[in-house]
Image (spheres, rainbow, N blue to C red):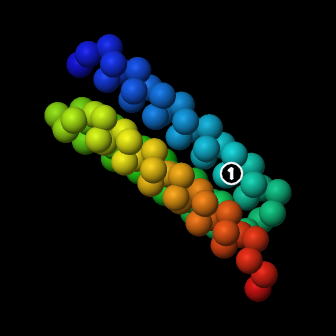
Amino acid sequence: MSNNELVSLGSLGVATLLAAAFLVNSWRKRHTRPPLYAAIVVLVVAAGAVMIALLGAPYRQVVGTAFIAEMLVVLVSARKDRRPG
């Protein structure tokens, strides 16, 4: 693995842990399910992306796709969490 790959996967890991921490904090405050589900999905997506990159897939495609997927999960979670009813 090159240095660029390690930096890219490391930044994915840090961003994922930070997003999951914010989502768990939101879940603790509101006691609603969407932030908890989103935190779990974000961690699973990141773990899958790291495994795929370690198995030899092009890391740029894997990390970029994982970042986009994680952002979408967080946005959907925020939308469902604030919807009345």
Identify the secondary structure beneath mark 1. Answer: helix
Instruction: Confirm whether residue 82 shows in the render.
Output: yes
Residue that lies at the very extreme toward the right in this rendered image: 29
- Three-letter residue code for mark 1: Val
Q: Horizontal and vertical percent for residue 55?
A: 18, 36
Viewer-closest of 45 and 65:
65
Above or below for 72 versus 50: below
Horizontally, residue 4 falls left or right of residue 82, namely: left
- The quadrant of the rendering that contains the C terminus is bottom right
Above or below for 73 versus 21: below
Residue that lies at the very extreme toward the top in this rendered image: 3
Going 75% across and 54% down the picture, which residue do you hit? Answer: 26
Q: Horizontal and vertical percent for residue 46?
A: 42, 44
Going 19% across and 38% down the picture, which residue do you hit? Answer: 57
- Say how many tags the image has: 1
Going 68% across and 51% down the picture, which residue do you hit? Answer: 24
Horizontally, residue 29 falls left or right of residue 67, namely: right
Q: Horizontal and vertical percent for residue 68?
A: 45, 50
Q: Would you name the residue on which mark 1 appears?
A: 24
- The 10 Å Cα crowd at callout 1, few under 14, some 14 to 19, many 20 or more, is some
* Res 33 → quadrant: bottom right
Q: Horizontal and vertical percent for residue 71?
A: 53, 52
Going 67% across and 52% down the picture, which residue do you hit? Answer: 23
Above or below for 37 versus 19: below
Residue that lies at the very extreme toward the left in this rendered image: 56
Horizontally, residue 13 falls left or right of residue 24, namely: left
- The quadrant of the rendering that contains the N terminus is top left
Instruction: Confirm whether residue 47 shows in the render.
Output: no
